[in-house]
């Protein structure tokens, strides 16, 4: 597995990371044992970047990570968490230094560390990105030693471009996959120019791009692919990448024809993301050890040919872009 320097930091991270939302909650029933096994398998496969958030299972994800890393010992991977979504209501005025510091203190306790490697504003209201005092507060928390670096997790390309105007923003986390190609148009070029680390989330479009979901797939009541399909709980772009379910299934069947023999569609979809050199790390989730191993296997796939990359672009342009391109 290749490693990349994480933007302007001293961290060196694996190109495939571990997204820890699934081991926290909102993905149906994932036992703590399965969550631990998934993380262990990822680390055994060479993963050195873990992404979580304080609201994933109300701290459950952070605590599992802390327990696994403590038990393993040795060199620690880079652990990124997020802050802001504990606000209720989730509004720009809540992004005060006092609130951010309380969230960060809670994550420090959950992760059992003295300083967070990276804290990311967790898809804040767009208005937050126009408030320099928020980033000033993060600067102060970094100077105090509670965080080493900070970044922003965003919904929209425009938010990413605004966020990297702040000189000490280290990273941007953004949705990018075969069904969400807009970040490659402008944002990635700017990220490269400013040496911003790019963390890619929702790489498999909530499982659509695993090729294992059908019209008959049943999702548990506490799985966001059930309760957030219309954006009732949070931004609909986080669920199936915002692609209408039936459209997504149709596009998946077109993509399936492009997957090389012997490779899973999930591994192919992850390799597609890694073909763009602006991507620092992609963070697929996993419900169990088998899925984690399958995700890591994407690193072993051969480069995707220009013809196949062009074919994925054509599928996106024809079927998917009308639903998502200008929205995010």
Image (cartoon, grey):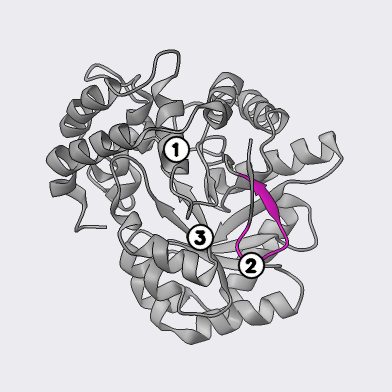
Secondary structure, mark 2, is: loop
In this picture, is 286 found above or below 88?
above
Q: Earlier in the sequence, mark 3 or mark 2?
A: 2
What secondary structure characterizes most of the magenta part? loop
- The residues bearing labels 1 and 2 have C-alpha atoms spaced at a distance of 33 Å
Give the number of the disc on residue 26: 1
Q: Taking the image as drawn, is residue 293 in sight?
A: yes
Label 3 – label 2 distance at C-alpha: 29 Å
Locate residue 240: give its quadrant.
Answer: top left
Pick whichever, 297 or 200, lies toward us.
297
Q: Which residues are magenta?
A: 6-14
Quadrant into which the C terminus falls: bottom left
Q: Nearer the viewer, residue 133 or 2?
A: 2
In the picture, measured across the screen, residue 68 lies left or right of residue 291, that is right
**Quadrant holding the N terminus:** top right
How far apart, in angstroms, are the residues tagged by discs 1 and 3?
15 Å
Q: Which mark is in front, 3 or 2?
A: 2
Residue pointed to by mark 2: 8
- Residue 63: where, in percent of width, then height? 69, 43
Q: Which is nearer the eye, 159 or 181?
A: 181
**Residue at the image point whose x is 41% and y is 60% from the top:** 188
Name the residue: 70% across, 68% down: 147
Instruction: Return the residue at label 3.
Output: 86
Q: Is residue 9 magenta?
A: yes
């Amino acid at each position: 597995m290749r490693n990349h320097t994480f933007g302007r930091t001293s961290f060196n991270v694996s190109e495939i990371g571990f997204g820890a939302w699934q081991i926290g909650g909102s993905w149906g029933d994932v036992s703590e044992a399965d969550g631990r096994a998934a993380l262990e398998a990822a680390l055994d496969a060479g993963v050195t970047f873990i992404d979580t958030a304080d609201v994933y299972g109300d701290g459950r994800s952070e605590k599992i990570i802390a327990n696994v890393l403590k038990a393993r010992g040795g060199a620690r991977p880079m652990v990124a968490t997020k802050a802001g979504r504990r606000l209720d209501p989730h509004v720009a005025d809540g992004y005060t230094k006092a609130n951010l510091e309380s969230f960060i203190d809670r994550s420090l306790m959950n992760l059992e560390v003295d300083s967070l490697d990276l804290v990311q504003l967790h898809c804040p209201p767009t208005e937050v990105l126009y408030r320099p005092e928020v980033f000033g507060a993060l600067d102060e928390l970094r100077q105090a030693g509670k965080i080493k670096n900070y970044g922003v997790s965003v919904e929209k390309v425009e938010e990413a471009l605004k966020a990297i105007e702040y000189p000490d923003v280290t990273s941007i986390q953004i949705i990018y996959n075969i069904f969400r190609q807009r970040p490659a148009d402008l944002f990635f070029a700017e990220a490269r120019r400013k040496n911003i680390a790019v963390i890619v989330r929702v790489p498999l479009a909530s499982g659509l791009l695993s090729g294992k979901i059908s019209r008959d797939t049943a999702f548990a009541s506490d799985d966001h692919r059930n309760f957030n399909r219309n954006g009732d709980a949070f931004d609909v772009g986080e669920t199936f990448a915002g692609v209408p379910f039936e459209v997504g299934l149709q596009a998946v069947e077109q993509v399936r024809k492009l997957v090389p023999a012997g490779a899973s569609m999930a591994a192919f979809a992850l390799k597609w993301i890694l073909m763009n050199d602006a991507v620092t790390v992609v963070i697929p989730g996993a419900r169990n050890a088998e899925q984690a191993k399958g995700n890591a296997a994407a690193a072993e796939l051969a480069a995707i040919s220009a013809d196949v990359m062009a074919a994925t672009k054509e599928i996106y342009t024809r079927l998917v872009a009308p639903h998502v391109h200008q929205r995010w």
